[in-house]
Amino acid sequence: MSAAQPSAQVIPEETTQGQRGKARRILLVLGAAALLIALVWGVWWWLTGRFIETTDDAYLQADSISVAPKISGYVAEVLVADNQVVRRGDLLVRLDARKYQAVSDEASATIAARNADLAKAEADLVQQDSTIAEARAQLQGAEADAKHAQAEVARYAPLARSGAEPEERLAQLNNELAQARSTVAARQAALRSSQTRYGTLQAQLKQAQAQLGVARASEAQRQLDVDDAVLRSPLDGRIADRGVRVGQYVQPGTRLLTVVPVNAIYLTANYKETQIGAMRPGQRVTVHVDALPGRDLRGHIDSLAPGTGAQFALLPPSNATGNFTKIVQRVPVRIALDITDDLRPALVPGLSATVEVDTRTGKADASHG
């Protein structure tokens, strides 16, 4: 005789209907919640979201300056440390300038010699003025003597012909006239020589002045070399990438360190070309920096680049080829940030960010521009 079969459990119909009703209510609530969320999102998108352009291809930047010497030499002092805050004009590095100082001193001595040459040339010119005046006076005296001798000859000639005066007296007067004319000729030659000498001295004076100018220019250049031995900070910022050491020999253009203007940080967001159609300078921007979770920064568009990033690459692409694949280009957008003092120490160039531009703002300003 076989064992008795267990009887199937009977689920009451009321329980099944209750469970189905509860599931329907849950689905209805979830559907209503989803519909409400979708409605709220749709309203937000229509009123706000469709005007927001977002990109995560954005980085903080600063116009850093690499400090390099203009002259060659050995590093005598390094006056700053890594990450140190500096002000514009602060001493950074000092090179050994002894040889440049010696050359500068030599140039100063050359200037003194050229000043002496110039003073001598000026004195010679003044003296030559006196010589010319003396020669002119002697010429005038000789001309007066010749005129007097000519008058004497003219007066005694008729008397000599009439026999009233002896011929010897007339001959003597003619001789004196000839001597006076010779003296006039000599005085004229002396005056011309003095005047020619004056022109020569004028040329020497100009030459001395030119040589003095050359000496002064040389001294100025040598002094620049001495001044260039001291490297100062070109702006306010912090020291970075310091590779200079005491005793190192450096050449002109050798990068010693970098000054980063951390108080002048801006943001560059690389937007797709399909996103910039409504962007204008002055539009408000919200920035989410990865290094500051939960803290939003505010700012505005400062300017848009005059070309895509590919146009300014070292090797710009050439699309005039047989095979072409369209690639969406990106346009750098420079954004000015409103940074509070408590956040400024945490913001350094190179940090990543997500940027949201509200294209509804700034339209009035853009239309006037």
Image: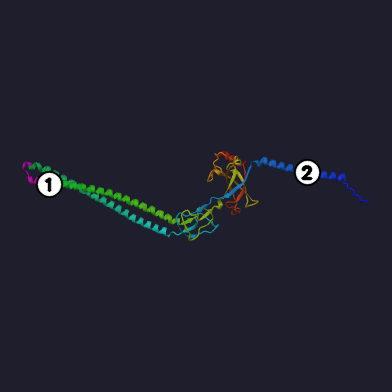
Instruction: Give the CA distance from mark 1 to mark 2.
Output: 152 Å
- How far from the left and from the top, in percent, is residue 62? 55, 50
Residue extending furthest toward the right: 1
- The residue at 11%/43% (across/down) is 155
The 10 Å Cα crowd at callout 1, few under 14, some 14 to 19, many 20 or more, is some
Name the residue tied to disc 1.
175
Q: Is residue 168 magenta?
A: yes
Amino acid type at mark 1: Asn
In-image side of 245 versus 278 (left or right):
left
Q: What colour scheme has been applied to the protein in the rendered image?
A: rainbow
- How far from the left and from the top, in percent, is residue 17? 85, 43
Magenta: main secondary structure equals helix
Read off the magenta span: 161-178
Front-lying residue, 202 or 102: 102
Mark 1 or mark 2: name the one nearer the start of the chain. Answer: 2
Give the number of the mark in front: 1 or 2: 2
Name the residue tied to disc 2.
27
Q: Is residue 145 visible?
A: no
Amino acid type at mark 2: Leu
- The residue at 10%/42% (across/down) is 157
Question: From what the image shows, is residue 262 above or below residue 51?
Answer: below
